[in-house]
Image (spheres, rainbow, N blue to C red):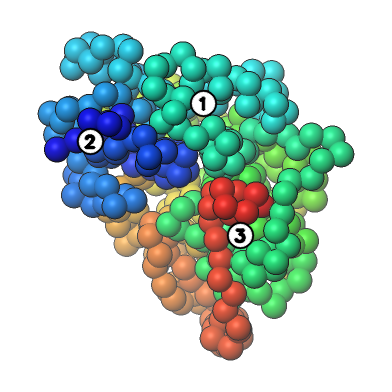
Amino acid sequence: MTDSSKISVIVIGAGSMAENIFPAIDADHVELLAFVDERPDMQGRELFATTIVALDHALALSFDYILVACRPADFVMTRLREDHNIPEEKIISLDFEKLLPASSPRQMYSTVHSIIKKYLKKTPGLSRALNLEILLKSHWISRFIEPEAGRSPRVDVSVQNRYLISDAQLGEYEDMILYRFLHNVENGFYVDVGCSDPLFMSVTNFFYSRGWSGINVDPRPEAMHKYDGVRSRDINCCLALSSENATKPFWVCKNGNLSTMDKDTVERLIKFPPNGNALYFIETSMDARTLTSLLDEHRPDGDIHFLKVDVEKHEKEVLQGMDFNKYRPWMLVVESTLPTTHVPCFEEWEHLITDFGYDFIMQQGINRYYISHEKKEELIAACVNQKLQPFLPRAHANLFFGM
């Protein structure tokens, strides 16, 4: 039974976009009926005390609007109109990034405020369904805002001193886990293979802000362009890594962050797209090199405090190209499930790590963590003996404390 005094909405998507935008949904004016996710392993779960259901289940409900909080939003909206006969005026995209000028990755606060406010006013009821001020503080939107000259973001220093702020993916928190073991390291060094974004869902931004530096690797020019001017201390490499120095096929995902060198993954994602949203790939080729050759060039000496590998089912090949006798990262964090799922796939590559003196220590979400034999006692002691400091995800810190 819906509350007739409120706007009833369905949210398509139960990922990071939905999680970041949810706090801006005004509970005084909105009744949130359901989140939609087409992955069977997600259905039946709850997100913010609201059940995640399949699309057909959601569309059987009585609703005023459908909020599309996933990508590709255009495809989802077309599917809703053409396959399910949902009137266009009832479907609203929350992919606000597409509203912003493509000429610059960041805009002034006043510009973003004006653009989104104008967009919200086009839809009756939407302007009161979403709190614009809270929306602009969400990490999903605030990452596109350039602080105005002479004006610093509002920061509650007492909160900043009390909490660590995680920039990693919600629910994974790789940076916080690594920091538990590596908090005694000053000016450390990381290698991030499959780095994607320097700020949003970044494993390394937390460490960079504490004086660390490292090597960031991603084969997509549009990803590495974001590092320009943001990571001046880092070595930023737009290239592919694999098991050998050779030309390799590479499938570019044109409407998502799922580009990969693994053909089986492409075929699976086309056949079973995440959230039911079709993905589009273009096959090309890239000159790949081994991780060992990259380190020979850029880090022949010196400690590597952690190596992170997240390359959409190409982890085995990247690890095959790493000489663990020559280079000994203290810790490893490797994505261990099939992309967009929680189905384990680490069995095919874990021996490439454990056979060379690394011990598995934990699994959190989609990642598995390892420590080298020679550093295990030291790092576990550092983790156990520290005074734990609580942390907040960046999205929540932005929302509640303006950090």
Say few, some or many: other residues with alpha carbon within 10 Å of mark 3 (under 14 / 14 to 19 / 20 or more): many
Quarter residue 36 falls in: top left
Q: CA distance from mark 3 to mark 2?
A: 37 Å
- For label 2, count other residues whose C-alpha is less than 10 Å away and answer few (under 14), some (14-19) or many (20+): few
Quadrant for the N terminus in the image: top left
Occupied quadrant, residue 191: bottom right
The image's mark for residue 52 is none
> Which amino acid is tagged 1?
Phe
Describe the element under mark 1 as helix, strand or loop: helix
Q: Is residue 317 visible?
A: no
Q: Nearer the viewer, mark 3 or mark 2?
A: 2
**Residue for point 40% across, 65% down:** 364
Q: On screen, 90 above or below 236?
A: above
Amino acid type for the residue under numbered disc 3 = Ile
- In the image, which is nearer the foreground, mark 2 or mark 1? 2
Mark 2 vs 1: CB contact within 8 A: no
> From the viewer's perspective, is 190 left or right of 75?
right
Query: Residue, x 48% and y 21% (percent of image)?
Result: 120
Q: Residue 289: percent from the left, percent from the top?
A: 59, 43
Among all residues in the image, which is located at the extreme front?
A: 5
- Tag 1 residue: 96
User: Residue tagged by mark 3?
Assistant: 165
Looking at the image, residue 214 sits to the left or right of residue 117; the answer is right
Q: Is 160 placed above or below 130 here?
A: below
Q: Amino acid at mark 2?
A: Asp
Q: Which residue is mark 2?
A: 3
Whole-number angstrom distance, CA of label 1 to CA of label 3: 24 Å
